[in-house]
Image (spheres, grey):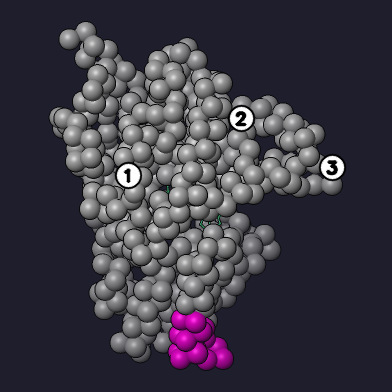
Amino acid sequence: MSKLHIVANRLPYSLKKEADGYELVESVGGLATGMKSVYTEYGGKWIGWSGVNSDELSPQESDAIDQKLLEKSCVTVPLSEQEILEYYEGFSNKTVWPLFHYFTQYVDYSPVNWEAYKRVNQRFADRVLEVAEDGDRVWVHDYQLLLVPEMIKSKKPNVTVGFFLHIPFPSYEVFRILPWRMELLKGMLGADLLGFHIYDYERHFLSSVRRLYGYEIAFNEIHADDRIIKADSFPMGIDYAKFKSTSASVMQKTIPERSELHKELEKYFMTSPDRRLILSIDRLDYTKGIPQRLKAFRKFMEKYPEFHGKVTLVMLAVPSRGQVEEYMMLKKEVDELVGNINGTYGNINYTPVWYFYRAMPFENLVELYNMSDVALITPLRDGMNLVAKEYVASRGNQTGVIVLSEMAGVAKEMGEAIIINPINEDEIAEALYRALTMPLDEQKQRMGYLQERIQRYSVFKWAGEFVDALENVKRIQKEFLVK
Ligand code: GDG
Protein backbone atom coordinates (compact mmCIF):
# COMPACT_ATOMS: atom_id res chain seq x y z
CA MET A 1 0.00 0.00 0.00
CA SER A 2 1.28 3.47 -0.79
CA LYS A 3 2.25 5.34 2.36
CA LEU A 4 1.13 8.79 3.39
CA HIS A 5 3.64 11.10 5.10
CA ILE A 6 2.87 14.35 6.89
CA VAL A 7 5.16 17.38 6.82
CA ALA A 8 4.53 20.29 9.18
CA ASN A 9 6.69 22.86 10.94
CA ARG A 10 6.05 21.12 14.28
CA LEU A 11 5.84 17.44 15.17
CA PRO A 12 2.76 16.19 17.04
CA TYR A 13 4.96 15.88 20.18
CA SER A 14 6.92 18.48 22.08
CA LEU A 15 9.87 17.82 24.36
CA LYS A 16 9.98 18.36 28.10
CA LYS A 17 13.33 18.42 29.85
CA GLU A 18 13.53 16.04 32.82
CA ALA A 19 16.48 15.17 35.08
CA ASP A 20 17.31 12.07 33.02
CA GLY A 21 16.75 13.48 29.52
CA TYR A 22 13.86 14.65 27.40
CA GLU A 23 10.29 13.33 27.66
CA LEU A 24 7.79 13.42 24.80
CA VAL A 25 4.55 15.31 25.43
CA GLU A 26 1.72 14.62 23.04
CA SER A 27 0.34 17.70 21.31
CA VAL A 28 -3.43 18.18 21.52
CA GLY A 29 -3.82 20.82 18.79
CA GLY A 30 -6.36 20.43 16.00
CA LEU A 31 -3.79 19.56 13.35
CA ALA A 32 -2.12 16.90 15.48
CA THR A 33 -5.51 15.30 16.26
CA GLY A 34 -6.65 15.17 12.66
CA MET A 35 -3.35 14.09 11.16
CA LYS A 36 -2.55 11.37 13.67
CA SER A 37 -5.54 9.44 12.43
CA VAL A 38 -4.20 9.72 8.89
CA TYR A 39 -0.48 9.02 9.03
CA THR A 40 -0.77 6.10 11.42
CA GLU A 41 -3.49 4.53 9.26
CA TYR A 42 -1.36 4.73 6.11
CA GLY A 43 1.92 3.66 7.73
CA GLY A 44 3.76 6.89 7.01
CA LYS A 45 6.07 9.22 8.91
CA TRP A 46 5.51 12.72 10.32
CA ILE A 47 8.40 15.03 9.42
CA GLY A 48 8.84 18.22 11.47
CA TRP A 49 10.74 20.22 14.06
CA SER A 50 10.69 19.12 17.70
CA GLY A 51 10.46 22.69 19.03
CA VAL A 52 13.92 22.53 20.67
CA ASN A 53 16.88 24.69 19.68
CA SER A 54 19.45 22.18 18.35
CA ASP A 55 22.39 24.33 19.60
CA GLU A 56 21.36 23.38 23.13
CA LEU A 57 21.58 19.63 22.53
CA SER A 58 24.67 17.44 22.77
CA PRO A 59 25.04 14.90 19.92
CA GLN A 60 24.02 12.14 22.37
CA GLU A 61 20.91 14.02 23.49
CA SER A 62 20.02 14.72 19.91
CA ASP A 63 20.37 11.03 18.94
CA ALA A 64 18.31 9.93 21.92
CA ILE A 65 15.51 12.36 21.00
CA ASP A 66 15.56 11.30 17.34
CA GLN A 67 15.33 7.67 18.41
CA LYS A 68 12.42 8.28 20.78
CA LEU A 69 10.53 10.21 18.12
CA LEU A 70 11.26 7.61 15.46
CA GLU A 71 9.54 5.04 17.66
CA LYS A 72 6.44 7.22 17.21
CA SER A 73 7.06 7.34 13.43
CA CYS A 74 8.31 10.93 13.64
CA VAL A 75 11.37 12.22 11.78
CA THR A 76 12.99 15.35 13.21
CA VAL A 77 14.26 18.36 11.31
CA PRO A 78 16.78 20.12 13.57
CA LEU A 79 16.76 23.93 13.76
CA SER A 80 19.52 26.07 15.28
CA GLU A 81 18.86 29.29 17.19
CA GLN A 82 19.79 31.37 14.15
CA GLU A 83 17.44 29.38 11.93
CA ILE A 84 14.59 29.70 14.40
CA LEU A 85 15.16 33.45 14.36
CA GLU A 86 15.41 33.85 10.60
CA TYR A 87 13.20 31.12 9.14
CA TYR A 88 10.52 30.79 11.83
CA GLU A 89 10.26 34.09 13.70
CA GLY A 90 11.62 35.92 10.67
CA PHE A 91 10.32 35.01 7.24
CA SER A 92 7.38 32.84 8.40
CA ASN A 93 6.04 35.10 11.13
CA LYS A 94 7.26 38.56 10.13
CA THR A 95 6.80 38.28 6.38
CA VAL A 96 4.31 35.64 5.26
CA TRP A 97 2.00 35.81 8.31
CA PRO A 98 1.33 39.59 8.21
CA LEU A 99 1.18 39.73 4.40
CA PHE A 100 -1.29 36.85 4.08
CA HIS A 101 -3.47 38.46 6.80
CA TYR A 102 -3.42 41.84 4.98
CA PHE A 103 -1.20 43.58 7.59
CA THR A 104 1.10 44.97 4.91
CA GLN A 105 2.45 47.64 7.26
CA TYR A 106 4.02 44.92 9.44
CA VAL A 107 5.76 43.01 6.65
CA ASP A 108 9.52 42.70 7.00
CA TYR A 109 11.33 42.28 3.66
CA SER A 110 14.60 40.90 4.95
CA PRO A 111 16.62 39.06 2.24
CA VAL A 112 18.61 37.35 5.00
CA ASN A 113 15.39 35.81 6.39
CA TRP A 114 14.33 34.78 2.89
CA GLU A 115 17.64 32.94 2.36
CA ALA A 116 17.16 31.13 5.68
CA TYR A 117 13.56 30.22 4.71
CA LYS A 118 14.80 28.62 1.48
CA ARG A 119 17.57 26.72 3.27
CA VAL A 120 15.28 25.39 5.99
CA ASN A 121 12.52 24.45 3.50
CA GLN A 122 15.19 22.52 1.58
CA ARG A 123 16.16 20.70 4.76
CA PHE A 124 12.53 19.66 5.36
CA ALA A 125 12.28 18.50 1.74
CA ASP A 126 15.54 16.52 2.04
CA ARG A 127 14.19 14.66 5.05
CA VAL A 128 11.02 13.86 3.11
CA LEU A 129 13.06 12.63 0.15
CA GLU A 130 14.89 10.24 2.48
CA VAL A 131 11.67 8.59 3.63
CA ALA A 132 9.23 8.88 0.70
CA GLU A 133 9.38 6.26 -2.03
CA ASP A 134 7.91 6.37 -5.53
CA GLY A 135 4.14 5.97 -5.32
CA ASP A 136 3.92 7.38 -1.76
CA ARG A 137 1.83 10.43 -0.88
CA VAL A 138 3.08 13.43 1.07
CA TRP A 139 0.84 16.02 2.72
CA VAL A 140 2.64 19.30 3.45
CA HIS A 141 1.13 21.85 5.86
CA ASP A 142 1.06 25.59 6.08
CA TYR A 143 2.82 28.84 5.44
CA GLN A 144 6.19 27.92 6.94
CA LEU A 145 6.75 25.34 4.20
CA LEU A 146 5.50 26.94 0.98
CA LEU A 147 8.58 25.90 -1.01
CA VAL A 148 8.60 22.27 0.06
CA PRO A 149 6.11 20.84 -2.51
CA GLU A 150 8.28 21.83 -5.49
CA MET A 151 11.46 20.74 -3.72
CA ILE A 152 9.95 17.26 -3.40
CA LYS A 153 8.33 17.10 -6.82
CA SER A 154 11.41 18.17 -8.76
CA LYS A 155 13.40 15.27 -7.29
CA LYS A 156 10.68 12.62 -7.05
CA PRO A 157 7.91 13.30 -9.58
CA ASN A 158 6.26 9.98 -8.76
CA VAL A 159 5.48 11.02 -5.22
CA THR A 160 2.01 12.60 -5.01
CA VAL A 161 2.14 15.86 -3.07
CA GLY A 162 -0.72 17.61 -1.30
CA PHE A 163 -0.48 21.01 0.36
CA PHE A 164 -2.89 22.65 2.81
CA LEU A 165 -2.74 26.32 3.78
CA HIS A 166 -4.18 27.01 7.24
CA ILE A 167 -4.19 30.80 6.88
CA PRO A 168 -5.85 32.97 4.22
CA PHE A 169 -4.33 33.28 0.77
CA PRO A 170 -4.53 37.03 0.09
CA SER A 171 -5.86 38.79 -2.96
CA TYR A 172 -3.42 39.15 -5.88
CA GLU A 173 -3.06 42.91 -5.22
CA VAL A 174 -1.60 42.09 -1.80
CA PHE A 175 0.33 38.97 -2.75
CA ARG A 176 2.10 40.77 -5.61
CA ILE A 177 3.78 43.14 -3.12
CA LEU A 178 6.17 40.38 -2.07
CA PRO A 179 9.51 40.47 -3.92
CA TRP A 180 9.65 36.64 -3.79
CA ARG A 181 6.08 36.08 -5.05
CA MET A 182 7.19 34.05 -8.10
CA GLU A 183 9.33 31.71 -6.01
CA LEU A 184 6.60 31.17 -3.40
CA LEU A 185 4.01 30.30 -6.05
CA LYS A 186 6.45 28.02 -7.83
CA GLY A 187 7.03 26.23 -4.54
CA MET A 188 3.29 25.73 -3.96
CA LEU A 189 2.73 24.59 -7.55
CA GLY A 190 4.95 21.58 -6.91
CA ALA A 191 1.87 20.11 -5.21
CA ASP A 192 -0.67 18.03 -7.14
CA LEU A 193 -3.49 19.23 -4.89
CA LEU A 194 -3.68 22.54 -3.01
CA GLY A 195 -6.23 22.85 -0.23
CA PHE A 196 -7.65 26.02 1.37
CA HIS A 197 -10.23 26.49 4.10
CA ILE A 198 -12.68 28.40 1.89
CA TYR A 199 -13.36 29.15 -1.75
CA ASP A 200 -12.27 32.82 -1.46
CA TYR A 201 -8.67 31.83 -0.61
CA GLU A 202 -8.65 29.27 -3.43
CA ARG A 203 -9.92 31.91 -5.86
CA HIS A 204 -7.23 34.41 -4.76
CA PHE A 205 -4.58 31.75 -5.24
CA LEU A 206 -5.82 30.82 -8.72
CA SER A 207 -5.91 34.47 -9.70
CA SER A 208 -2.27 34.95 -8.62
CA VAL A 209 -1.27 31.83 -10.58
CA ARG A 210 -3.03 33.10 -13.68
CA ARG A 211 -1.54 36.57 -13.50
CA LEU A 212 1.98 35.68 -12.48
CA TYR A 213 2.49 32.45 -14.44
CA GLY A 214 -0.14 32.83 -17.17
CA TYR A 215 -1.27 29.22 -16.81
CA GLU A 216 -4.63 28.25 -18.19
CA ILE A 217 -7.18 27.55 -15.46
CA ALA A 218 -10.31 25.52 -16.12
CA PHE A 219 -12.65 25.74 -13.13
CA ASN A 220 -10.26 24.61 -10.37
CA GLU A 221 -7.70 22.79 -12.51
CA ILE A 222 -4.44 24.47 -13.37
CA HIS A 223 -2.83 23.38 -16.64
CA ALA A 224 0.79 24.01 -15.81
CA ASP A 225 2.94 23.07 -18.82
CA ASP A 226 2.64 19.27 -18.86
CA ARG A 227 0.92 18.84 -15.48
CA ILE A 228 -2.56 19.15 -14.05
CA ILE A 229 -2.75 20.67 -10.59
CA LYS A 230 -5.94 20.94 -8.59
CA ALA A 231 -7.03 23.52 -6.02
CA ASP A 232 -10.02 23.02 -3.77
CA SER A 233 -11.54 24.12 -0.49
CA PHE A 234 -11.70 21.88 2.60
CA PRO A 235 -13.00 23.72 5.69
CA MET A 236 -11.12 22.18 8.60
CA GLY A 237 -13.24 20.64 11.35
CA ILE A 238 -12.63 19.64 14.98
CA ASP A 239 -12.76 16.47 17.05
CA TYR A 240 -16.41 17.19 17.82
CA ALA A 241 -17.01 14.08 19.94
CA LYS A 242 -14.11 14.95 22.24
CA PHE A 243 -15.48 18.42 23.04
CA LYS A 244 -19.01 17.12 23.44
CA SER A 245 -18.08 14.30 25.80
CA THR A 246 -15.58 16.36 27.85
CA SER A 247 -18.18 19.08 28.22
CA ALA A 248 -20.76 16.56 29.48
CA SER A 249 -18.32 14.94 31.89
CA VAL A 250 -16.99 18.17 33.47
CA MET A 251 -20.54 19.32 34.12
CA GLN A 252 -21.50 16.02 35.75
CA LYS A 253 -18.71 16.22 38.32
CA THR A 254 -19.67 16.43 41.98
CA ILE A 255 -18.84 19.70 43.75
CA PRO A 256 -15.60 18.51 45.40
CA GLU A 257 -14.40 17.05 42.07
CA ARG A 258 -14.83 20.33 40.19
CA SER A 259 -11.92 22.53 39.14
CA GLU A 260 -11.22 25.83 40.90
CA LEU A 261 -12.29 27.70 37.78
CA HIS A 262 -15.56 25.77 37.60
CA LYS A 263 -16.30 26.60 41.26
CA GLU A 264 -15.50 30.28 40.73
CA LEU A 265 -17.78 30.43 37.69
CA GLU A 266 -20.59 28.84 39.67
CA LYS A 267 -20.14 31.33 42.47
CA TYR A 268 -20.37 34.13 39.91
CA PHE A 269 -23.68 32.86 38.53
CA MET A 270 -25.11 32.23 41.98
CA THR A 271 -24.86 35.87 43.07
CA SER A 272 -27.75 36.83 40.76
CA PRO A 273 -29.99 35.08 38.20
CA ASP A 274 -29.25 37.92 35.72
CA ARG A 275 -25.54 37.25 35.53
CA ARG A 276 -24.14 36.60 32.05
CA LEU A 277 -20.74 35.55 30.72
CA ILE A 278 -19.21 36.55 27.41
CA LEU A 279 -16.20 34.51 26.28
CA SER A 280 -13.23 35.51 24.17
CA ILE A 281 -10.37 33.07 23.42
CA ASP A 282 -7.39 33.43 21.10
CA ARG A 283 -3.63 33.62 20.84
CA LEU A 284 -2.59 37.20 21.52
CA ASP A 285 -2.16 38.08 17.85
CA TYR A 286 -2.83 41.32 15.99
CA THR A 287 -4.95 39.43 13.44
CA LYS A 288 -7.48 38.50 16.12
CA GLY A 289 -8.91 42.02 16.63
CA ILE A 290 -8.56 41.99 20.43
CA PRO A 291 -8.28 45.77 21.03
CA GLN A 292 -11.27 46.41 18.73
CA ARG A 293 -13.21 43.76 20.66
CA LEU A 294 -12.43 45.42 23.99
CA LYS A 295 -13.42 48.83 22.65
CA ALA A 296 -16.70 47.36 21.41
CA PHE A 297 -17.34 45.85 24.85
CA ARG A 298 -16.61 49.28 26.38
CA LYS A 299 -19.11 50.82 23.98
CA PHE A 300 -21.68 48.20 25.00
CA MET A 301 -21.15 49.11 28.66
CA GLU A 302 -21.51 52.77 27.77
CA LYS A 303 -24.76 52.26 25.85
CA TYR A 304 -26.44 49.71 28.10
CA PRO A 305 -25.93 50.66 31.76
CA GLU A 306 -28.63 48.16 32.75
CA PHE A 307 -26.00 45.43 32.20
CA HIS A 308 -23.48 46.92 34.65
CA GLY A 309 -22.77 44.45 37.40
CA LYS A 310 -24.43 41.68 35.39
CA VAL A 311 -22.18 40.96 32.42
CA THR A 312 -18.56 39.85 32.49
CA LEU A 313 -16.20 39.35 29.58
CA VAL A 314 -13.82 36.45 30.21
CA MET A 315 -10.84 37.07 27.99
CA LEU A 316 -8.27 34.34 27.52
CA ALA A 317 -5.25 35.56 25.56
CA VAL A 318 -2.65 32.87 25.01
CA PRO A 319 0.90 34.29 24.86
CA SER A 320 2.32 34.05 21.35
CA ARG A 321 5.47 35.26 19.51
CA GLY A 322 6.29 37.52 22.47
CA GLN A 323 9.72 38.48 21.08
CA VAL A 324 8.25 40.20 18.02
CA GLU A 325 7.80 43.97 18.45
CA GLU A 326 4.23 44.18 17.11
CA TYR A 327 3.16 41.53 19.62
CA MET A 328 4.74 43.41 22.53
CA MET A 329 2.92 46.59 21.48
CA LEU A 330 -0.34 44.69 21.23
CA LYS A 331 0.11 43.26 24.73
CA LYS A 332 0.59 46.77 26.11
CA GLU A 333 -2.50 48.06 24.33
CA VAL A 334 -4.64 45.17 25.59
CA ASP A 335 -3.37 45.56 29.17
CA GLU A 336 -4.26 49.26 29.08
CA LEU A 337 -7.72 48.73 27.63
CA VAL A 338 -8.59 46.07 30.21
CA GLY A 339 -7.38 48.42 32.96
CA ASN A 340 -9.42 51.26 31.52
CA ILE A 341 -12.67 49.25 31.33
CA ASN A 342 -12.26 47.71 34.77
CA GLY A 343 -11.32 51.09 36.24
CA THR A 344 -14.35 52.77 34.69
CA TYR A 345 -17.09 50.18 35.21
CA GLY A 346 -15.81 47.92 37.99
CA ASN A 347 -16.42 48.15 41.72
CA ILE A 348 -15.50 46.14 44.78
CA ASN A 349 -18.01 43.40 43.87
CA TYR A 350 -17.73 43.49 40.13
CA THR A 351 -14.94 43.17 37.55
CA PRO A 352 -16.25 43.65 33.97
CA VAL A 353 -13.26 41.95 32.27
CA TRP A 354 -11.56 38.85 33.64
CA TYR A 355 -8.31 38.76 31.74
CA PHE A 356 -6.07 35.67 31.64
CA TYR A 357 -2.79 36.04 29.80
CA ARG A 358 -1.83 32.35 29.70
CA ALA A 359 -2.84 29.00 28.26
CA MET A 360 -5.35 26.94 30.24
CA PRO A 361 -5.65 23.17 30.58
CA PHE A 362 -8.07 21.60 28.12
CA GLU A 363 -10.69 20.86 30.78
CA ASN A 364 -10.83 24.52 31.87
CA LEU A 365 -11.19 25.58 28.27
CA VAL A 366 -14.22 23.32 27.87
CA GLU A 367 -15.70 24.59 31.15
CA LEU A 368 -15.48 28.12 29.78
CA TYR A 369 -17.14 27.05 26.53
CA ASN A 370 -19.87 25.27 28.43
CA MET A 371 -20.62 28.02 30.92
CA SER A 372 -20.47 31.13 28.71
CA ASP A 373 -23.67 32.61 27.31
CA VAL A 374 -21.99 34.32 24.38
CA ALA A 375 -18.82 33.61 22.37
CA LEU A 376 -17.37 36.86 21.06
CA ILE A 377 -15.10 36.03 18.10
CA THR A 378 -13.97 39.09 16.18
CA PRO A 379 -10.75 38.50 14.20
CA LEU A 380 -9.73 41.08 11.60
CA ARG A 381 -8.57 38.13 9.46
CA ASP A 382 -8.58 34.43 10.32
CA GLY A 383 -8.02 31.42 8.06
CA MET A 384 -10.76 29.43 9.80
CA ASN A 385 -11.07 29.88 13.62
CA LEU A 386 -11.59 26.62 15.42
CA VAL A 387 -12.68 28.28 18.67
CA ALA A 388 -16.11 28.99 17.14
CA LYS A 389 -16.54 25.29 16.28
CA GLU A 390 -15.33 24.15 19.70
CA TYR A 391 -17.85 26.44 21.40
CA VAL A 392 -20.66 24.87 19.34
CA ALA A 393 -19.53 21.32 20.19
CA SER A 394 -19.40 22.10 23.92
CA ARG A 395 -22.96 23.47 24.23
CA GLY A 396 -24.68 20.51 25.83
CA ASN A 397 -28.06 22.23 26.32
CA GLN A 398 -28.02 23.90 22.87
CA THR A 399 -28.21 27.45 24.23
CA GLY A 400 -25.56 30.11 23.63
CA VAL A 401 -24.98 32.67 20.89
CA ILE A 402 -21.92 33.35 18.73
CA VAL A 403 -21.06 36.90 17.69
CA LEU A 404 -18.75 36.27 14.77
CA SER A 405 -16.54 38.30 12.45
CA GLU A 406 -17.30 38.09 8.76
CA MET A 407 -13.50 38.02 8.24
CA ALA A 408 -13.07 34.53 9.75
CA GLY A 409 -13.19 31.60 7.34
CA VAL A 410 -15.61 29.86 9.71
CA ALA A 411 -18.26 32.56 9.07
CA LYS A 412 -19.02 30.81 5.77
CA GLU A 413 -20.29 27.79 7.71
CA MET A 414 -22.10 29.71 10.45
CA GLY A 415 -24.98 31.69 9.06
CA GLU A 416 -26.80 31.18 12.37
CA ALA A 417 -24.24 33.23 14.29
CA ILE A 418 -24.64 37.02 14.58
CA ILE A 419 -22.23 38.15 11.88
CA ILE A 420 -20.43 41.47 12.39
CA ASN A 421 -17.70 43.60 10.84
CA PRO A 422 -14.83 43.44 13.38
CA ILE A 423 -13.88 47.10 12.94
CA ASN A 424 -17.41 48.34 13.57
CA GLU A 425 -17.59 48.85 17.34
CA ASP A 426 -21.21 50.04 17.25
CA GLU A 427 -22.30 46.99 15.32
CA ILE A 428 -20.53 44.67 17.77
CA ALA A 429 -22.05 46.48 20.76
CA GLU A 430 -25.53 46.03 19.22
CA ALA A 431 -24.78 42.40 18.44
CA LEU A 432 -23.84 41.83 22.08
CA TYR A 433 -27.12 43.32 23.18
CA ARG A 434 -28.99 41.13 20.73
CA ALA A 435 -27.10 38.02 21.85
CA LEU A 436 -27.68 38.71 25.55
CA THR A 437 -31.40 39.27 25.06
CA MET A 438 -32.05 36.51 22.51
CA PRO A 439 -34.97 34.26 23.57
CA LEU A 440 -33.91 30.73 24.55
CA ASP A 441 -36.03 29.13 21.82
CA GLU A 442 -34.26 31.09 19.14
CA GLN A 443 -30.84 30.28 20.65
CA LYS A 444 -31.67 26.58 20.63
CA GLN A 445 -32.90 26.63 17.09
CA ARG A 446 -29.77 28.36 15.81
CA MET A 447 -27.41 26.23 17.90
CA GLY A 448 -29.20 23.06 16.79
CA TYR A 449 -28.46 23.79 13.14
CA LEU A 450 -24.88 24.72 13.92
CA GLN A 451 -24.29 21.54 15.91
CA GLU A 452 -25.67 19.37 13.16
CA ARG A 453 -23.41 20.97 10.56
CA ILE A 454 -20.19 21.14 12.60
CA GLN A 455 -20.60 17.58 13.89
CA ARG A 456 -20.96 16.24 10.37
CA TYR A 457 -17.69 17.69 9.05
CA SER A 458 -15.22 16.70 11.79
CA VAL A 459 -11.44 16.94 11.53
CA PHE A 460 -11.39 13.23 10.64
CA LYS A 461 -13.80 13.74 7.79
CA TRP A 462 -11.78 16.76 6.64
CA ALA A 463 -8.54 14.76 6.57
CA GLY A 464 -10.25 11.83 4.85
CA GLU A 465 -11.69 14.03 2.13
CA PHE A 466 -8.34 15.64 1.45
CA VAL A 467 -6.68 12.23 1.10
CA ASP A 468 -9.47 11.03 -1.22
CA ALA A 469 -9.09 14.16 -3.32
CA LEU A 470 -5.35 13.49 -3.58
CA GLU A 471 -6.12 10.04 -4.99
CA ASN A 472 -8.57 11.59 -7.39
CA VAL A 473 -5.96 14.02 -8.74
CA LYS A 474 -3.67 11.11 -9.51
CA ARG A 475 -6.46 9.61 -11.61
CA ILE A 476 -7.14 12.89 -13.44
CA GLN A 477 -3.43 13.32 -14.15
CA LYS A 478 -3.23 9.80 -15.64
CA GLU A 479 -6.24 10.44 -17.89
CA PHE A 480 -4.65 13.71 -19.02
CA LEU A 481 -1.42 11.94 -19.99
CA VAL A 482 -3.32 9.28 -22.00
CA LYS A 483 -5.07 12.03 -23.99
C1 GDG B 1 -4.38 28.65 12.60
C2 GDG B 1 -5.17 29.70 11.80
C3 GDG B 1 -7.08 28.10 11.67
C4 GDG B 1 -6.60 28.35 22.64
N1 GDG B 1 -6.36 28.70 23.90
C5 GDG B 1 -6.12 27.57 24.59
C6 GDG B 1 -6.24 26.49 23.71
N2 GDG B 1 -6.52 27.01 22.52
C7 GDG B 1 -6.73 26.23 21.28
C8 GDG B 1 -8.18 26.29 20.86
C9 GDG B 1 -8.07 26.05 19.34
C10 GDG B 1 -6.67 26.59 19.01
O1 GDG B 1 -5.98 26.79 20.23
C11 GDG B 1 -6.73 27.91 18.28
O2 GDG B 1 -7.15 27.66 16.97
P1 GDG B 1 -7.62 28.79 15.96
O3 GDG B 1 -8.22 28.13 14.79
O4 GDG B 1 -8.59 29.67 16.65
O5 GDG B 1 -6.36 29.71 15.63
P2 GDG B 1 -4.78 29.64 15.25
O6 GDG B 1 -3.97 29.16 16.37
O7 GDG B 1 -4.45 31.01 14.79
O8 GDG B 1 -4.62 28.60 14.01
C12 GDG B 1 -6.66 29.52 12.04
C13 GDG B 1 -6.19 27.07 12.33
O9 GDG B 1 -4.80 27.35 12.08
C14 GDG B 1 -6.50 25.65 11.82
O10 GDG B 1 -6.33 25.55 10.44
O11 GDG B 1 -8.41 27.89 12.11
O12 GDG B 1 -7.39 30.45 11.26
O13 GDG B 1 -4.74 31.02 12.16
O14 GDG B 1 -8.09 24.68 19.05
O15 GDG B 1 -8.90 25.31 21.53
N3 GDG B 1 -6.10 25.21 24.09
C15 GDG B 1 -5.83 24.98 25.42
N4 GDG B 1 -5.68 26.00 26.31
C16 GDG B 1 -5.82 27.29 25.95
O16 GDG B 1 -5.67 28.19 26.77
N5 GDG B 1 -5.71 23.71 25.86
The residue that mark 3 highlights is 20
Location of residue 334 with respect to 73 vertically, above or below: below
Which residue sits at x=58%, y=55%?
Answer: 363
Residue 261 visible (yes or no): yes
The residue that mark 2 highlights is 75
Quadrant that contains the C terminus: top left
Q: Nearer the viewer, residue 362 or 79?
A: 79
Give the image location of residue 418, x and y in percent: 27, 64
**Left/right of residue 36 with respect to residue 163 in the rendered view:** right
Which image quarter: residue 420? bottom left
| Circle 1: residue type | Arg
The main secondary structure of the magenta stretch is helix
| Circle 3: residue type | Asp
The residue that mark 1 highlights is 181
Q: Secondary structure at mark 3?
A: loop
Which badge, 1 or 2, is on the more N-terminal residue?
A: 2
The CA span between labels 3 and 1 is 46 Å
Which residue sits at x=62%, y=33%?
Answer: 76
Q: Nearer the viewer, residue 454 or 117?
A: 117
Give the image location of residue 12, x and y in percent: 58, 39
Location of residue 40 with respect to 406 vertically, above or below: above
Question: Which mark is nearer the camera, 2 or 3?
Answer: 2
What's drawn in magenta, residue-wise? 336-351
Give the image location of residue 224, x and y in percent: 24, 26
